[in-house]
Amino acid sequence: MNDDSVISIANVSKIYKLYERPLDRVKEALNPFGKQYHYDFHALKDVSFEVKKGETLGILGRNGSGKSTLLQIIAGVLWPTSGRVTVNGKVSALLELGTGFNPEFTGIQNIYFNGSIMGHSKSDMDRRLDDIISFSEIGDFIKQPMKTYSSGMCIRLAFSCAVNIDPDILIIDEALAVGDIKFQKKCYDKMNAFKDSGKTIIWVTHGGIKDFASRGMVLNNGRQIFVGSAEEADLKYMKLLYPEKNESQEDNETSITPERTIEAESNHKLETQYSIEKEEYCLEIIPNKSNSDKSFGYGGAWINWIKIYGLKEPNIFQRGDTLIFKIAAEWDKERIKKIVNEENLPNNLIVGCGCDNQKGITMFGFNIYEKGYLIDPTKNSEGYITFKICLPNLKSGSYFIYPAIALGTQEHHIQLRWYQNLIHLQCVSDPKYEFGEIKIDYDVNDVDCN
């Protein structure tokens, strides 16, 4: 274990014995010949990683991948079947809803009960009681039995107990999804304060860790398949959700020149229109095998090229600029029909883009569905889409555009092809007018100093 590591997990496995019938457990225990009636379920298989002081590790994985088991082992609630776990520091864990609470106890009684489980004395909890009650915001219910609480009230009290005992390591297992939006914001503010103070956080969720975590890990069927940057972890997890499905056509994907169709004539006019202004540039991106590792999806659709008009330099824009995005998309009609039937989705293709800043925070997105346009993939096998985007007043810095093709509707869809961070653009603005990520337009109607 390195000197700067607070958690070290070395070759940890957790095996449960499962029985088809309750009686089989008794038969195995009493069998004089040691006959087995169980089968082994590997919740975790040879997991190894380290977490350094001050890091925020986001853990991703589908249901049943072993995320909660791993957190319980780190928190000391479970023992591993094999392997070594080393934790240096005071741990506070927010695991499954209700863990560490007795439903017959009042909220106040449960604060002390939970504190004793975590190794805190009564006098220690006496000093923290007011802060815990104040943060939870459950009012007079703090004096009522927890069996009368809603799930949101339970999580308020649980999170308040977890963060107000000044832990070195905070462990959170998907619990924040239960609280209301206002309380979730309060929790994230508290967690950000923990990060800023150098605390270590381990956080399990179902995607989107790049906005908060410094590193990420992906589990699948109990195995650790990735540990690294939060952005790459998000991408690996999305590829688990939308695996490739034997697309020989896309394996031999080649760039397609726009001149091969009638649509290219209008595309050429667009290029000519924007080449008149010598200060504006056209950026052309052609996805191919070199960046295929940054894409995921069910397959069956892909982007041949993207052209962006109106840039000041090949990849420079100023906040508030108007850009033109021209996208050439292509798809396999037969594969799309098969996916529609298998996934029970509407027969609609949606083409659009999203934009993240350099911190991984999504700033905006746009697609044809929001504007009432639909593509019927059974009529043709290719299409051209043009977006005219009036950019918001963004802060100076790097921005990453990720185009995507989905199947279905805005509310219910699957990703056929998502090109993660395919396009890198740079915003240049006068920094003295910048405050926050986006600058708003406003007027001052009156200033009265008398």
Image (cartoon, rainbow, N blue to C red):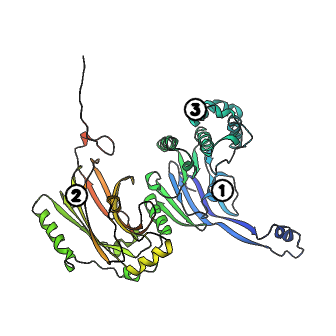
53 to 10, vertically: above or below = above
Residue 352 is covered by the magenta coloring: no
For mark 3, does the 10 Å Cα neighbourhood hold few (<14), some (14 to 19), or many (20 or more) residues?
Answer: few
Q: Amino acid at mark 3?
A: Ser
For mark 2, does the 10 Å Cα neighbourhood hold few (<14), some (14 to 19), or many (20 or more) residues?
Answer: some
Q: CA distance from mark 3 to mark 2?
A: 49 Å
Camera-side mark, 3 or 1: 3
- Side of 166 where 448 appears, left or right: left
Camera-side mark, 2 or 1: 2
Q: Amino acid at mark 1?
A: Ile
Q: Amino acid at mark 2?
A: Leu
Residue 113 occupies which quadrant of the picture?
Answer: top right
User: Disc 1 marks which residue?
Assistant: 73
Q: Nearer the viewer, residue 428 or 121?
A: 428
User: Mark 2 or mark 3, which is nearer the start of the sequence?
Assistant: 3
**Residue 427 shows up from this direction:** yes
State the predominant SS element of the stretch in magenta. loop
Q: Position of residue 5 (x, y in %)?
A: 55, 52
User: Disc 2 marks which residue?
Assistant: 323
User: Disc 3 marks which residue?
Assistant: 134
Q: CA distance from mark 3 to mark 1?
A: 31 Å
Image quarter (top left, top right, bottom left or bottom right) of the C terminus: top left
Q: Nearer the viewer, residue 355 or 104?
A: 104
Secondary structure beneath label 2: strand
- Side of 212 where 383 appears, left or right: left
Residue at the spot 57% in from the left edge and 35% down from the top edge: 137
